[in-house]
Structures are given as structure tokens and as C-alpha cells.
């Protein structure tokens, strides 16, 4: 089912109202997280003629929604928690993502033979889309169901940082599939370092300047305006300079949080900012998951659901073994994370917003791209969102109960 057209302001208002109803009525968010409910409603709305003109693009997701969500996550993430788990978060977000993408690509390629004809590079492209995690629907569940906050901290910290690595991998593999580029390990390392360090540097510089400007600004509405400029300005400037806008926003949010914690006399600024961004976040999330659901029916008309399930399961199993391998590299991590913790971090790695944004960026190349790649990957993302979101609370509750 193909849809075209544009999304009007009337669509946005109705979707926001639906989101408000879901957040208000959904009293069992542990078992049925709001994003999952919104996703299912979005799929249902796709069959309503009024919404068949609604079409979400990569630009809407990547340039309008993503900077705000990343900024909120980074700004609200306690700096002490980031510093405490910096080692494992960094490893999972770099070496872990690269290892997961390569291993998953190889497994998908080997398992695809009975189902369809898929090139090895195509399998790597699928893997690169499925590596970024988006635990927006599970972090609050983990914090409420577990007495140990380290699981939620590692999951949330990894998801903030690994998007930058995933985008670099995706760009390389997409270039190989669509334009026939060759792979160079030296070029990959150079691009990865340049894109990552450049993005972090721009975000940190922007955030430092905003923190200095706060001293000159006494009205709270202007302070909120500065935070909006910081979130989107750091992203757009970084992207214009061809470095990671994702990492720029994350760095900007972390530095701002750190600076506000240091400036005790200005601690009330955080309350002002929270009051604004805590309204923005659920509004954006409501729109994102409803729109993903509406868009899903464009991609899920496939007859390869068995293979989609295989790809989803392979992504979970490989993530588990990569996590276990990284944890066992250092004695301190082995003592801190047992197999139950590794299992929770694995199952909490839901594929979501970033994976969909990467998928939608391939839309303009549909003619030169195997349609199976889009359908299979979108299907695996949907399974991840639905199955993992519904089962994370029972799993975390079971492990917590056994600890007791």
C-alpha cells in the first residue's frame, strides 16, 4: 500500500491528542509501555482514509525529532552515572556495535540462503540498521523494577552514544550497496575518528558558550530558548561540517548538565528547563511512534516473516554474546555484571527511532536497492519494538525476584 502527500497541522493535532489519551489512560505501562500502544494504534490508523496521506520522512525524524530526544536523554542523564560507567558504555558503543554489525551481517547472509538471494554487503547493511538501540520505552521500567540502577544507566548511556557509530557503519555499507564503493579499513577508522571527535567537540563548545550566556540571562523563558538553540544548533552545525550531529547533541546535553550541577547558585535553571523539556519529550514520542505505525504498512507487505523472525532472534543472540565477551575482557566488569545483568542489557536493546530513520534515508534509493532489505529490516524493527517492550518488565521482575 503506497501513500503520498503531506502531513498537515490537523493531522499533528489529532495525533497529539491521541498520544495524550494513551499516556493518560495507559495504567499498565510496565506490561504495555505507551510507545508500544502508540505503535499499534498507528498501524490501525494507517487503514483509515483520513490518515493515508500522512507520510513520515527521514528529514522529519532525523532533523526535527531526533535532536530533541537525544538532548533530553543526555541532559537528564546524571553525569556521575556516566563517569562511573564510562568504560563499558564506550566499549559497547564502539567495539560492541562494530562487532555486532559484522557478526550479524555474516549470520544473516549465511541464514538467508533458504529464503531469498541476499548479498553479503546487503546483509551488512541490514545489520548496521539493526545495531543502534532505542530503549525509550524500557529505561523507566528498568529503574522501577530493579533496585540496582546500573542496568538502566548502561542501557541508556549506550543508546545515547552508539547512534554515532551506527551512522558511520550505515553510511559505509549503504555506499557499498547503492554506489558500489569499496571498503577500506583505514578509511573507516579515519572517518569514524573524524566524525566522532568532531561531533563531540562541536557539542561541547556550543554547550560551553550557552553556559556562559546563562550568566547574562535572568529571565527563565530566555534560558529555555537558549537550550532549544543548543539542541538544534549543535546538531545542524555538526551536520553542515559533515561530522556527527548525533554525538554533538549528546555532548551538548551532557556538558550542560555538568555545568548546571557545578553552578549551585543557578541550580533553579534546571527546574525551568525540566518543566519545558518534560512536556516536549512525550509530545515528540507520541508523534514518532504513531507515525512509525502509520508508515509500517508501506514496508510490511512481505512473505518472508519466518526469515524476519530469524533475523530478529539472531540480532538478540549476537548482542548477548558480544556483551558477554566485552564484560569478560576486564575483571572489574566481570565482578559487576553477572549473566542476568548481561541478559537484561541485551533484551533492553530495543531497535526503534534511529533504525527507522536510517531505513527511511534509503527511500530515495528504492529503485537501485533490493526491496527485501527494506521490508526485512523494518519487520525486524517492529518485532523488536513489540516483543521486547512487552516482555522487559516480566524479565526484569523475574531476575529481581530471584535476587531477593
Image: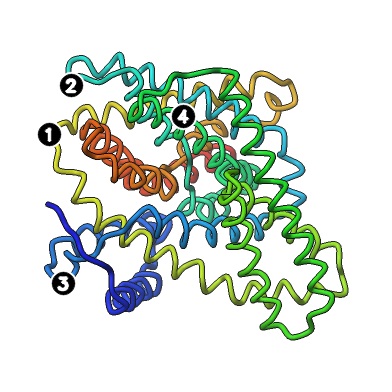
Q: Which residue is mark 2?
A: 116
The residue carrying pointer 1 sits among few (fewer than 14), some (14 to 19) or many (20 or more) residues within 10 Å by Cα, namely few
Q: Which mark is residue 137?
A: none
The residue carrying pointer 2 sits among few (fewer than 14), some (14 to 19) or many (20 or more) residues within 10 Å by Cα, namely few
User: Mark 2 to mark 1: distance in Å?
Assistant: 11 Å
Residues 302 and 176: in front is: 176
Disc 4 or disc 1, which is closer to the eye?
4
In this rendering, the answer to whether 285 lies above or below 401 is below
Q: Which residue is mark 3?
A: 50
The residue carrying pointer 3 sits among few (fewer than 14), some (14 to 19) or many (20 or more) residues within 10 Å by Cα, namely few
Quadrant that contains the C terminus? top right
Q: How is the image coloured?
A: rainbow
The residue carrying pointer 4 sits among few (fewer than 14), some (14 to 19) or many (20 or more) residues within 10 Å by Cα, namely many
Helix, strand or loop at mark 4: helix
Residues 10 and 179: in front is: 179
| Residue in view at x 65 percent, y 76 percent | 224
148 left or right of 68 in image = right
In this rendering, the answer to whether 2 lies above or below 169 is below
Q: Which residue is mark 4?
A: 172
Q: Position of residue 227 (x, y in %)?
A: 66, 69
Helix, strand or loop at mark 3: helix
Q: Which residue is mark 1?
A: 303
- Disc count in the image? 4
Tell me which numbered mark, 3 or 4, is placed earlier along the sequence. Answer: 3
Helix, strand or loop at mark 2: loop
User: Mark 3 to mark 4: distance in Å?
Assistant: 39 Å
| Residue in view at x 79 percent, y 73 percent | 214
| Residue in view at x 39 percent, y 60 percent | 60
Residue 152 showing in the rendered view:
no
Amino acid at each position: 500500500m503506497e501513500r503520498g502527500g503531506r502531513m498537515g497541522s490537523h493531522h499533528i493535532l489529532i495525533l497529539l491528542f491521541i498520544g495524550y489519551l494513551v499516556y493518560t489512560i495507559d495504567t499498565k505501562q510496565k506490561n504495555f509501555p505507551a510507545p508500544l500502544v502508540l505503535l499499534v494504534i498507528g498501524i490501525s490508523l494507517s487503514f483509515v482514509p483520513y490518515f493515508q496521506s500522512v507520510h513520515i520522512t527521514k528529514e522529519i525524524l532525523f532533523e526535527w525529532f531526533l535532536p530533541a530526544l537525544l538532548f533530553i536523554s543526555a541532559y537528564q542523564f546524571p553525569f556521575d552515572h556516566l563517569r562511573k560507567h564510562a568504560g563499558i558504555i564506550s566499549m559497547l558503543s564502539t567495539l560492541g556495535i562494530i562487532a555486532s554489525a559484522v557478526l550479524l551481517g555474516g549470520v544473516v547472509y549465511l541464514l538467508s540462503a533458504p529464503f531469498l538471494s541476499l548479498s553479503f554487503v546487503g546483509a551488512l547493511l541490514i545489520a548496521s540498521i539493526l545495531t543502534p538501540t532505542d530503549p525509550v520505552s524500557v529505561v523507566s521500567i528498568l529503574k522501577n523494577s530493579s533496585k540496582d540502577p546500573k542496568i538502566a544507566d548502561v542501557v541508556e548511556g549506550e543508546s545515547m552514544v552508539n547512534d554515532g557509530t551506527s551512522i558511520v557503519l550505515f553510511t559505509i555499507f549503504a555506499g557499498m550497496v547503492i554506489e558500489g564503493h569499496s571498503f577500506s579499513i583505514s578509511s573507516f577508522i579515519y572517518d569514524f575518528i573524524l566524525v566522532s571527535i568532531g561531533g563531540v567537540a562541536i557539542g561541547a563548545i556550543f554547550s560551553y558558550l550557552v553556559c556562559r550566556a546563562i550568566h547574562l540571562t535572568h529571565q527563565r523563558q530566555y534560558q529555555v530558548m537558549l537550550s532549544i538553540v543548543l539542541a538544534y544548533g549543535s546538531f545542524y552545525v555538526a551536520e553542515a561540517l559533515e561530522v556527527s550531529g548525533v554525538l554533538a547533541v549528546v555532548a551538548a546535553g551532557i556538558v550542560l548538565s555538568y555545568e548546571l550541577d557545578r553552578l549551585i547558585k543557578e541550580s533553579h535553571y534546571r527546574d525551568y528547563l525540566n518543566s519545558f523539556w518534560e512536556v516536549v519529550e512525550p509530545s515528540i514520542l507520541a508523534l514518532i511512534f504513531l507515525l512509525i505505525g502509520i508508515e509500517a504498512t508501506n514496508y510490511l507487505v512481505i512473505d518472508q516473516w519466518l526469515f524476519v523472525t530469524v533475523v530478529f532472534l539472531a540480532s538478540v543472540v549476537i548482542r548477548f554474546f558480544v556483551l558477554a565477551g566485552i564484560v569478560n575482557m576486564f575483571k572489574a566488569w566481570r565482578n559487576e555484571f553477572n549473566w542476568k545483568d548481561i541478559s537484561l542489557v541485551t533484551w533492553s536493546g530495543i531497535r526503534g527511532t534511529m533504525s527507522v530513520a536510517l531505513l527511511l534515508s534509503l527511500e530515495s534509493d528504492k529503485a537501485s536497492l533490493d526491496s527485501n532489505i527494506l521490508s526485512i529490516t523494518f519487520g525486524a524493527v517492529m518485532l523488536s519494538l513489540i516483543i521486547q517492550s512487552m516482555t522487559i518488565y516480566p524479565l526484569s521482575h523475574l531476575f529481581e525476584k530471584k535476587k531477593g
